[in-house]
Image (spheres, helix red, strand yellow):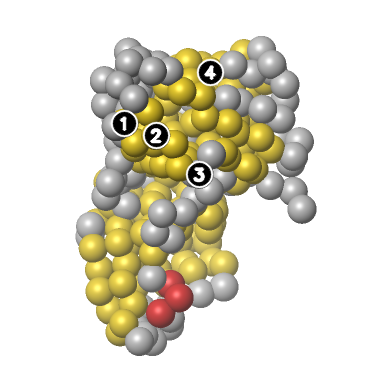
Amino acid sequence: DGGITQSPKYLFRKEGQNVTLSCEQNLNHDAMYWYRQDPGQGLRLIYYSQIVNDFQKGDIAEGYSVSREKKESFPLTVTSAQKNPTAFYLCASRQLTLTGEDGYTFGSGTRLTVV
Amino acid sequence: SQQGEEDPQALSIQEGENATMNCSYKTSINNLQWYRQNSGRGLVHLILIRSNEREKHSGRLRVTLDTSKKSSSLLITASRAADTASYFCATERTGRRALTFGSGTRLQVQP
């Protein structure tokens, strides 16, 4: 089955630690995205990538870093510079078309808690 | 920044009734999309409407778009208890190929 897989489902981080969230897709989608969701809120864009070895900052990129070395993988690192990292993190992918009319496919999310 | 704002924030209806959710946005857009999220899960794409379209249907869903008012509405007809979820509008604004999501409407359908 084609899909997008996020791991782990739950992650606990001590203050001052960096942690990396995994996102893998086997849909052959060009673009991948990371969003953060706080309780009762909408999604805010962290980073996105439209092509391998290239990515752009979203609205809340500070304290986060990404890489896109392979088409199927887009890991997100939450660094110690992110002051309030406790949140639900969602990864998504999309096949880019000339008209950009494809919807996103989302993973099931990683819930990160700082302890 | 939140591009879209949904209204109402929460909606509770009885099974069989229709549910209407509204979304407003701020900038020029290429398209507007609606997503559904069950509690603690990822989002599922429901429907996309282009900026040059005014209405679109998919099963029990009807979406309208008014670009002059920068607003959209999602109508779910003959609602079911399984429709209970949060619904988000998302816009792809001109010049950025990434979606910006609204704050969502929490829909509760009572059996």
Residue at 49 percent across and 50 percent down: it is: B42
Q: Is residue A48 above or below residue A100?
A: above
Residue at 43 percent across and 81 percent down: it is: B80
Q: Is residue B57 above or below residue A80?
A: below
Q: CA distance from mark 1 to mark 2?
A: 6 Å
Residue at 45 percent across and 75 percent down: it is: B82
Residue that mark 3 sits on: A9
Residue closest to the eye, A59 or B19: A59
Under circle 4, the secondary element is strand
Quarter of the C terminus of chain A within the rendering: top left
Under circle 2, the secondary element is strand
Name the chain under label 1: A
Total numbered labels placed on residues in the image: 4
| Residue A114 tag number | 1
Give residue B34's position: percent from left, percent from top.
46, 53
Classify residue B111 as left or right of residue A51.
left
Q: CA distance from mark 3 to mark 4?
A: 19 Å
Same chain, labels 1 and 4:
yes
- Marks 1/2 in contact by CB < 8 Å: the verdict is yes
- Sequence order check: which comes first, mark 1 or mark 4? 4
Residue that mark 4 sits on: A66
Same chain, labels 3 and 1:
yes
- Sequence order check: which comes first, mark 3 or mark 1? 3
Under circle 1, the secondary element is strand
